Amino acid sequence: MKLTLNWLRDFVELVLPVDELCDALVMAGIEVEGLDEHRPIWSPVEIVELVAVEKHPNADRLRLCTVRRGSAEIVRVVCGASNMQAGDRVALAPPGTDLPGARRIERATIRGQVSEGMLCASRELDLPEDGVDGIMILPPDAPAGRRLVDYLGAADTVLDLAITPNRGDCLSVLGIAREIAALTGAKLHVAPAPLHEQDPPTGSAIRVNVDAPDLCPRYAARVARGVRVAPSPPWMQTRLVMVGMRPISNVVDVTNYVMLERGQPLHAFDLARIADARIVARRAGSRQSFVTLDGVARELLPDDLVIADGRGPVALAGIMGGANSEIRPDTTDILLESAYFTPSGIRRTARRLGLVSDSSYRFERGVDPTATVAALDRAAELIAATSGGMIASGAIDKQAARRLRPASIRVRPARVNALLGTTLTAAEIERPLRALGAIVSGGRSALRVIAPSHRSDLQNEVDLIEEVARLSGYDAIAAAMPAIVAAGPGRGPHREPEERLRHALRAAGFDEMITLAMISAEDNRVFPGLPDLPGEAVALQNAPSSDAAELRRSLFPGLLQALDVNRRHGEPLVAGYAIGRVYARHGERYHEGDALGMILAGEWPPAVIGEMPRPATFADLKGAVALAFERLGLGPARWESLESEAPYLHPGKAARITIAGVLCGVAGALHPDVATARGLDGDIWLAELDMVRVVQYCPRRVVFRPLPRFPAVLRDLAVVVDGSIQAQQILDAISEVAPPLVEEVRVFDQYTGAPIPQGKKSIAYSISYRAADRTLTDEEVNALHEDLVARLVGRVPVEVRQ
Amino acid sequence: MKGTLEALGAEIETALDACRSEDDLERARIAFLGRKGRLTEVMRGVGALVPEERPAIGELANALKRRVEQRIDDLRERWKAERRQRELEGERLDPTLPGRAWPYGHAHPLTAALDETVGILVSLGFSVYEGPHIEDEYHNFEALNIPSDHPARDMHDTFFVDRTHILRTHTSPVQIRVMENQEPPVAAIAPGAVFRHDDDVTHSPMFHQVEGFLVDRGVTFAHLKGVLSLFVQRMFGDDSRLRFRPSFFPFTEPSAEIDISCVICGGTREVGGAACRVCKASGWLEILGAGMIHPAVFRAVGYDPEAVSGFAFGVGIERVAMLKYGINDIRLLFQNDLRFLRQF
């Protein structure tokens, strides 16, 4: 919210320099987001009276103007405009005046005539556009001789303040002035509006009824007759523009001005267009369409509060007026509304319609229910002053039977100190509350506090404790360390394994990535996550874009996007991992679990000078996963060919990873067709693991295994098998027939080509024999091995190579 | 005889000096020391000498032989060493060529900042809890004293999932979930992703927070100041200064926003004579929101606000990382540009 220092000075003396004032506001919870000093460089510009306007003797399009300056000095000025006449008040830039755009006015001779300065147009002074073709014509009461900058109030400082949602009372100049008074001890002064009322009374022009006192506890109105709708006076326009509001007309500007000044939203109706001279504050009663003054048709629900006349709604109460009753250039009689509408009702309607106005914003945050008529009178005063209207005598003021009354709140000094960690006395607690305008009574063990009517946020003891802390200053509370003794899971069960996993993957050369949880529906369709992830994708009802329409089921889309980003600037290798949540909907329930995603594409490992770079392979990826598993202390994981569970992977270059028979992840090459569709090429290796399952199989602790005391004896076994047989199948078969003294079987070579027949391959295994209690002899091992080979041949179709 | 030996000695010296290769040397050795070599023959002649002369001449001859053998060995050794030296010099590498870029992955700056935050708070006695990202409105709003018609909901641009579910807009619902399941005392932190519908260039729709709260008998605002001061000093250095400003959150009262002295200008508001751009010449940077847990929140979880009190705070991890590393654009944190990630 913007306001100006001079406007504040209308209500309170500013005893602090501006930077200290800003600090004081910040430390009281009102953030100063901007401070903008307006110091027009054209300050010498003066209001003068035009005495005579003549044609320039030597130029058809120029005028020779005689003006009287404040000093009664008469000077002559040459002017190119023609919209002025003798008697007008105009703005003279005397010689020596600087104007925006690096112009300097000097005494000049123009076509033989001396010109003692320049008469200014509003745009030459960067003032609000007045729509006039020519120079600025000021109101007849503008005092000749006064500096224009003072007359307009154009030299001022604008503060931009951030007001928290609980402080509706601060959404006005008066509200901030009150706060400054409480903070600095300066006195607040609010002059009553001097009103010249004229019969016939308001009641003869309009009748007001409130049919929905729950939504409209108070409704006040006045009538002004004989109004002339015109631009508002320059000083008012200047202020409105400074605080970011567009001037419209004197009547509308007054309602805005008073709203900004007092925090009370007002509305002006064209009285002639109020049917049956009757206003009712009531529920809409039925679904209907209503055109607000911005020209938009709004759908009303039966419970929405409207202001209606004899025909129907004329305003969406507290939010926006209707097009059917708005002030027009020919309006002469107006009805001014000032009301208190219930915050929740306004919010409900405004939210549903997506219509936030300056008015609804204030009503939602609570206006002062006791200031309704004061603001109305202030507006009436300004209407009379700026538009020549006559104010009908008496204000209409309809109030609900049950008045809005501030609560009486008990404040226990002991409680204040217990919550703040302070040792304040009752008197020290009372002082800031009184500064706020609260009425404080009561004794030592508890104070009785009645909050001021504008502070609807003060309802409970804790609200007042906050006020005590706020106004005493948070700095006044000394820091202390608590003894923190509480049961709890410490770092939790999965942070530690997750950290080990991350370390392992980084050691394997994978960079950590963080990708957004929102992806496109198409990405979720292509990458539906691990084969047993249940349910369907979770869609957002108010997605920001189609690229972020759903919550991811897989980390792959994000990683592939990262690949794309990095390839675009020529990165030869992308090795990345991400740990992040994946989401699924399962009927009425939602499933969330952490997943690990990996991507590997490019040259791996990075070659040095003299080596041939080689593209990353499946083995590179598998090795990194295996390293991570090893660091997690996981038992052997099984890698098997994936069938059709992950259609986004290459059907021949993909695997499922199981631990203890449970599917924990998939790995493989991105399907070339999927890659092409995304504009990617080359082998792109991907892996995705279910972190929840992986962590579940992590041993909680490492248990030492004694070192073997006797040597192992190795025997190699090479078998020729059909090309379709996988190494693991033979390995499984060997394990099945292996005697107990076989310690380990591993694959150490694979070969195709001569002399192995076409369609066959040779796989070599290394079998390690070891006894725990003795050194095995060659004869013993030979016998065991021959037996093993014989049993293997009997079990699977292999041919043993010699 | 003696004269002959001396002459031969001189001749051998000359011959050896003339040797230029191992072959030359071998030929010289054979010529003088071989079976039919000149010195060998001379030595054979020693036996024919008169017995009185024999020992002295024999000694001379032997000494000459040893000297010549030594000389030959020395020459051989020297040439061998020189040859080895030449060989090794031929194997010279260029140590100025680049080394292998051993791939070692980098921790994401957000993870680093999150780990550090969690580490500090765990060391102070807080335990880690987690909650769902797809949260119900009750835990995200109502239980936190944010009723549906409260303007404070405007502070949260919410993503909706269905009629009752949203993406959590802060980590505060974990407060409710923990307190629903545990009696005080509770010292908890809740790290994780949160979501807001912000299209702004300075905001990301997904970002990370760490929520922390302590509930016990006698917990005060002074304790909140103590814990957060310690946290900030460990995170940003002992010379960081703090400022507690009144603010508003529906689920805490009194509420505060906490600023630290600007990490760039150190609170002096200027850098090299120009206004500091990071803190916009205010000298302060907002880093945390905090306050005393609102009695309405305690009532929602069945705690007695007259019996226990507590504080809660929330820190934005993107903000911490950006301040700590001087990152000026939040979008860099989610683009996964390796040129960025490899700096950490």
Image: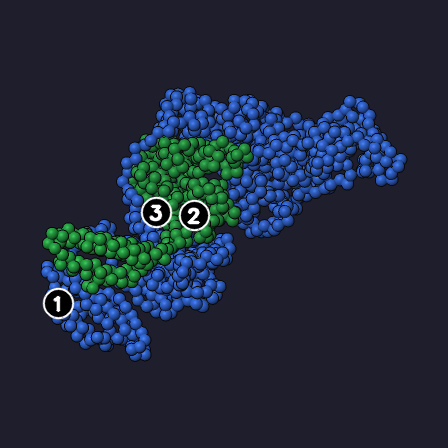
Say if residue A346 shows up in the picture.
yes
Residue projecting furthest to the front = B50
Residue hosting label 1: A778
Label 3: how many residues lie within 10 Å, few (<14), some (14-19) or many (20+)?
some
The residue tagged 3 is B130
Could you tell me which quadrant the N terminus of chain B lies in? bottom left
Dot 2, how many residues are within 10 Å of its Cα: few (below 14), some (14-19), or many (20+)? few
Of badges 3 and 1, the one in the foreground is 1
Q: Can residue A400 be seen in this view?
A: no
Between the residue at mark 3 and the residue at mark 2, the CA separation in whole angstroms equals 30 Å
Which residue is at a point 53% across and 27% down the rendered structure image? Answer: A20
Q: Tell me where residue A420 appears, x and y as whole percent.
A: 38, 29
Local SS, label 1? helix
Q: Nearer the viewer, mark 1 or mark 2?
A: 1
Q: Position of residue B250 (x, y in %)?
A: 43, 38
From the viewer's perspective, is A118 left or right of A789? right
Q: Would residue A491 be found to the left or right of residue A549 on screen?
A: left
Which residue shows up at 62% across the image and 28% down it?
A: A6
Toward the viewer: A448 or A13?
A13
Query: Chain coloured green: which letter?
Result: B
Q: Chain A is drawn in which colour?
A: blue
> Which of the numbered marks, if any, corresponds to residue B343?
2
Q: As shown in the figure, which amino acid type bears the numbered disc 2?
A: Gln
Helix, strand or loop at mark 2 = loop
How far apart, in angstroms, are the residues tagged by discs 3 and 1? Answer: 59 Å
Q: Which of the 4 image quadrants contains residue A421?
A: top left
